[in-house]
């Protein structure tokens, strides 16, 4: 039982990270109806942005010598790294959309899809050129501590709680943006019918750029939270591929285009993955995502919360 | 108010409009009638900027709007209620209405205008919080018109407002179109397959046939025209 609870906790914190990446896939799909396969690489850039930003943040917010004790300076530093990485990726997302996808807006979707794979490869190899091919250690921006008193065998770290809390906060902000703001309503309108949206006076270009920015910022958040979740986290220019694919599976599992679906899909996939590792064999860690993808495409192609796309007549 | 000169629209190799010219004077109701596929909807789509023009010019209030993107055209007070209504079924009735006012900043004026819209379409008020997808066809048409009114248009283009609607509601909707024209002074360009109805409420009419204007006259004259009678008014 303890082991099950343990795996569940670990799975949920992994799933939270998949969920954040999956939201980017699903939002972009919502407005443009294509899968941005470069999204996993935006996640990678988010990790590197965090790594390079950290020393600058630490100059302004000096870190105490005793890293095992909580300090506002450390917490503020971690938050600043998170926020700045999100900003970097938001800009990156907007730039990618502007330079690459917008000129192809009227082209067949397959063209855009193949281009997305091109962008993905570009980011990976340009990343290799820029950051070097060797894995780098992400600095410990939030020293970890185990929460005591949960029983002898159950291990929950402070940082896991932080990951949950920040993810929930980001989801709340996202909900607010999508459901309550003018641009969020425009996003929903555009995803339903772009022509009608433009007849309302919505500038579709602006809304699409905003969506890319938002999704990319969430990918950066996922990268930094992942670094907070796993101590001694090493990053390299190809690190985005697997999480990218898994988050894509999570988005499909939840129903592509559905925001709650992306979250549910991410959490399910995270839990499944840790369960497979915990009870089965670590060898199948990555296989489970693909098994889920095949199963969902066979039995419920619209995903758990997706709505069936009706062909418009 | 709206002047269209020699408008051409091509879909790939097919020419949908051959040099269409239409004048919509301020304060009038002008109707465009014609058979299926004559190019009525294409004309409206070209004016509102969602179909690319292949030549000709469109002037609104003296300003050339031919190459403007749709959101810039709405901003100028020319609003298109498209064929099939195109309401956002995933949003509530209220959200749909407010989207109509997307480009406006004078939020303080919204409640009074919403009240006016509820005055002409009381059904919308009852269904304000409901998802727009649950509305009947007629209610969706009311919503589409109400949404367009929220953009505070000076000219309204309506594409087939009678399509797929119960006959009783068609009458109501046409009455409201006339009311909006008279009371708010909104100029109207109406595209309609139901020529009888359209010619009844409009001042001038244009007859479109395979992408060309073949007749243009006052509606009174058009109703007496033998060809119009035979082809569009059912003898």
Image (tube, coloured by chain):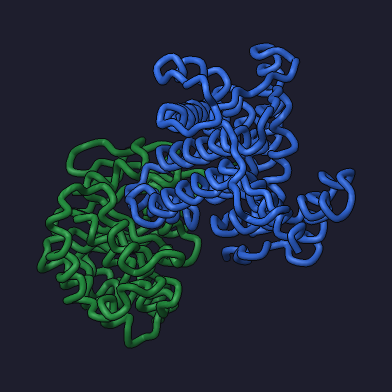
Chain colours: A blue, B green
On the rendered structure, is B197 left or right of A104? left
Residue at 22% x, 71% y is B177
Image quarter of the N terminus of chain A: bottom right
On the rendered structure, is A41 left or right of B190? right
Q: Position of residue A303 (x, y in %)?
A: 68, 62
Whether residue B189 appears in this view of the structure is no
Whether residue A221 appears in this view of the structure is yes
Image quadrant assignment for residue B40: bottom left
Q: Nearer the viewer, residue B64 or A42?
A: A42
Q: Position of residue B93 (x, y in %)?
A: 34, 69
Image quarter of the C terminus of chain A: bottom right
Residue at 39% x, 85% y is B166
Judge whether A144 appears above or below B100 on screen. Answer: above
Residue at 69% x, 19% y is A136
- Count of picture labels: 0
Q: Nearer the viewer, residue A106 or A194?
A: A194
Judge whether B222 appears above or below B45 on screen. Answer: below
Q: Nearer the viewer, residue A35 or A66?
A: A66
Q: Position of residue B62 (x, y in %)?
A: 18, 39
Residue ranking furthest to the bottom:
B168
Q: Position of residue A191 (x, y in %)?
A: 49, 53
Residue at 46% x, 28% y is A74
Judge whether A174 appears above or below A237 on screen. Answer: below
Image quadrant assignment for residue A157: top right
Judge whether B84 appears above or below A25 on screen. Answer: below
Q: Nearer the viewer, residue A88 or B36?
A: A88
On the rendered structure, is A154 left or right of B77? right
């Amino acid at each position: 039982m303890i082991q099950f609870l343990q795996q569940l906790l670990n799975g949920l914190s992994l799933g939270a990270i998949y969920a954040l990446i999956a939201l980017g896939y699903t939002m972009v799909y919502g407005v443009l109806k294509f899968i941005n396969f470069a999204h996993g690489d935006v996640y990678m850039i988010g990790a590197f942005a965090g790594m390079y930003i950290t020393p600058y943040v630490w100059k302004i917010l000096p870190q105490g010598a005793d890293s095992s004790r909580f300090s506002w300076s450390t917490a503020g530093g971690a938050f600043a790294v998170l926020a700045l990485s999100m900003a970097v990726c938001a800009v990156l997302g907007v730039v990618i959309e502007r330079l690459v996808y917008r000129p192809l807006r009227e082209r067949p979707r397959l063209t855009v899809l193949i281009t997305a794979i091109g962008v993905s490869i570009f980011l990976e190899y340009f990343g290799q050129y820029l950051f070097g091919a060797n894995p780098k250690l992400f600095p410990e921006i939030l020293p970890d501590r185990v929460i005591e008193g949960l029983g002898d065998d159950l291990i929950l770290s402070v940082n896991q709680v932080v990951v949950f809390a920040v993810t929930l906060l980001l989801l709340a902000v996202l909900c607010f943006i999508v459901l309550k703001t003018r641009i969020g309503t425009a996003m929903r309108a555009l995803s339903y019918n772009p022509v009608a949206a433009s007849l309302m006076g919505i500038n579709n270009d602006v809304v699409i750029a905003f969506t890319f920015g938002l999704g990319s910022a969430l990918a950066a958040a996922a990268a930094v939270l992942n670094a907070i979740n796993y101590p001694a986290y090493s990053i390299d220019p190809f690190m985005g591929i697997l999480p990218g694919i898994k988050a894509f599976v999570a988005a499909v599992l939840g129903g592509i285009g559905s925001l709650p679906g992306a979250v549910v899909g991410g959490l399910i996939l995270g839990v499944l993955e840790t369960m497979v590792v915990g009870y089965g064999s670590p060898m199948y860690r990555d296989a489970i995502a693909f098994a889920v993808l095949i199963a969902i495409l066979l039995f419920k192609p619209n995903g758990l919360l997706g709505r069936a796309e009706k062909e418009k007549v | 108010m709206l002047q269209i000169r020699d408008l051409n629209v091509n879909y790939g190799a097919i020419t949908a409009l051959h040099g269409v010219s239409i004048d919509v004077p301020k304060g009038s109701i002008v109707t465009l009638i014609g058979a299926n596929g004559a190019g009525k909807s294409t004309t409206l789509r070209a004016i509102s900027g969602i179909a690319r023009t292949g030549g000709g010019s469109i002037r609104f209030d003296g300003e050339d709007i031919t190459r403007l993107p749709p959101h810039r055209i709405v901003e100028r007070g020319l609003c298109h209620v498209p064929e099939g209504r195109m309401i956002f079924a995933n949003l509530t009735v209220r959200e749909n209405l407010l989207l109509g006012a997307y480009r406006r900043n004078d939020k303080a004026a919204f409640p009074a205008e919403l009240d006016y819209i509820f005055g002409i379409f009381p059904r919308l008020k009852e269904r304000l919080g409901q998802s727009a997808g649950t509305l009947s066809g007629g209610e969706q048409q009311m919503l589409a018109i109400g949404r367009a009114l929220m953009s505070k248009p000076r000219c309204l283009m309506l594409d087939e407002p009678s399509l797929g609607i119960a006959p009783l509601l068609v009458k109501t909707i046409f009455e409201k179109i006339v009311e909006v024209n008279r009371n708010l002074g909104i100029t109207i360009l109406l595209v309609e397959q139901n020529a009888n109805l359209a010619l009844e409420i409009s001042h001038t009419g244009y007859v479109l046939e395979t992408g060309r204007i073949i007749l243009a006259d006052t509606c009174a004259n058009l109703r007496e025209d033998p060809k119009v009678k035979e082809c569009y008014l059912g003898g």
